[in-house]
Image (tube, rainbow, N blue to C red):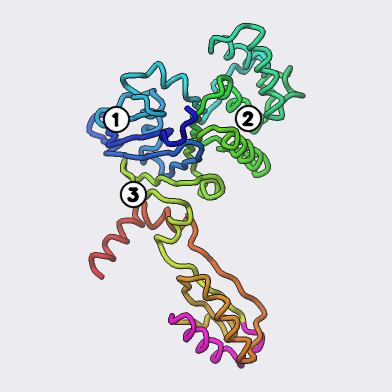
């Protein structure tokens, strides 16, 4: 599986129904080898159901999935050797030590007793749990449990790892450590498909984001591409001398060919489609003898993307477009 031309995940038209509920309604996605794909969506959008079908835990009612070119339905046994799954809750024994847990899972994966112990030691050191290897899980913190659960899913070093909300409930420091671990996995050759409720997490980690709502893919792009889809960046300026604000607004409008709004006596804001024009604005203001005390450019956030494309936000946007 060293051929990067082969997609790690290739899904077309996935459908899954539960009674009258169409939980997944035609989801298609592609995940390149060696990348991180973030799957976002509101609660009940169909994210976990989609992951379950990709990870061979649930059969789709329609559609097809290939993992590294292998059909999930026809070649399930091969696919399961290529994937690792870390769920939202640790699938480990509270009364056993970290070392014992990893050793048991190693044996379940088919390794000898000696190899299982060796892998357990290696993973505990890799995830910063070496000092706690003899401690029972009941004495582990939430962050330590999540790291151990991830270590369990990596015993066989699968080339594709499904992470279902891996940092839920973790403190900011531990979340950052987990992000570093996930990046290191990809640097080591793994592909990661990540579901998360934290939009900043997807922004930090994902090469591409698939946004699912009501069982359908409503957007699929890079984080920056998604941000651009809901609006342009905005330029914020504060003029040192408020008496120059009107002139600064006129000059900025002329350079950007966009309407400038005076938020306060000396604060200006304007949409900026081309960030490259910032230099032109600053040069024009300097030539006019106008001094600035503050300048910043704000991009749309993934929060804005989320609310614009899912739930009531997407409904309001559709109605606005129809009425506009």
User: Reading the chain from its start, which is encountered first: label 1 or label 3?
Assistant: 1
Residue 248 colored magenta?
A: yes
Residue drawn at the location 52% of the way across and 84% of the way down: 252
Query: Percent x, y for residue 248?
Result: 56, 87
Part of the protein shown in magenta: 239-258
Q: Quadrant of the C terminus?
A: bottom left
Decide which of 137, 229 is in the foreground and name it. Answer: 229
From this view, report whether residue 5 is shown above or below residue 282: above
From this view, report whether residue 322 is shown above or below residue 4: below
Q: Which mark is residue 64?
A: 1
CA–CA distance in space, label 2 to label 3: 32 Å
Mark in front: 1 vs 3: 1
Q: Which mark is residue 147?
A: 2
CA–CA distance in space, label 1 to label 3: 19 Å
Query: Percent x, y for residue 207?
Result: 50, 46
Mark in front: 2 vs 1: 1
Residue 254 colored magenta?
A: yes
Q: Going by the picture, which residue comes out furthest to the right?
A: 131
Characterize the local packing of mark 3: few (<14), some (14-19) or many (20 or more) Cα atoms within 10 angstroms.
some
Q: Quadrant of residue 20?
A: top left
Query: Percent x, y for residue 54?
Result: 38, 29
């Amino acid at each position: 599986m060293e051929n990067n031309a082969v997609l790690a995940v290739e899904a077309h038209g996935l459908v899954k129904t539960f009674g009258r509920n169409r939980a997944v309604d035609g989801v298609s996605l592609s995940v390149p080898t060696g990348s991180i794909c973030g799957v976002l969506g509101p609660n009940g959008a169909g994210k976990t159901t989609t992951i379950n079908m990709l990870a061979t835990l649930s059969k789709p009612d329609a559609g097809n999935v290939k993992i590294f070119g292998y059909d999930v339905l026809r070649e399930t046994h091969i696919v399961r050797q290529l994937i690792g799954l870390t769920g939202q809750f640790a699938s480990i024994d509270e009364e056993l030590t970290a070392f014992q847990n990893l050793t048991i899972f190693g044996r379940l994966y088919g390794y000898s007793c000696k190899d299982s112990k060796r892998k357990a030691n290696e993973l505990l050191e890799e995830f910063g749990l070496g000092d706690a290897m003899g401690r029972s899980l009941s004495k582990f913190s939430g962050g330590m449990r999540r790291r151990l659960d991830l270590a369990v899913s990596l015993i066989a070093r699968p080339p594709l790892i499904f992470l279902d909300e891996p940092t839920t409930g973790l403190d900011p420091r531990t979340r950052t450590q987990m992000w570093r671990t996930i990046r290191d996995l990809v640097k080591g050759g793994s592909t990661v498909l990540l579901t998360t409720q934290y939009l900043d997490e997807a922004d930090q980690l994902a090469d591409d984001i698939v946004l699912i709502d009501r069982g359908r893919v409503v957007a699929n792009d890079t984080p920056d591409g998604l941000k651009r889809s809901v609006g342009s960046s905005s330029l914020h300026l504060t003029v040192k001398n408020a008496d120059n604000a009107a002139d600064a607004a006129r000059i900025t409008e002329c350079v950007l060919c966009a309407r400038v709004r005076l938020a306060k006596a000396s604060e200006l804001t304007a949409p900026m489609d081309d960030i490259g024009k910032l230099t032109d604005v600053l040069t024009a203001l300097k030539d006019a003898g106008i001094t600035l005390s503050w300048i910043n450019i704000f991009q749309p956030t993934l929060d804005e993307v989320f609310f614009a494309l899912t739930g009531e936000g997407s409904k309001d946007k559709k109605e606005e477009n129809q009425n506009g």
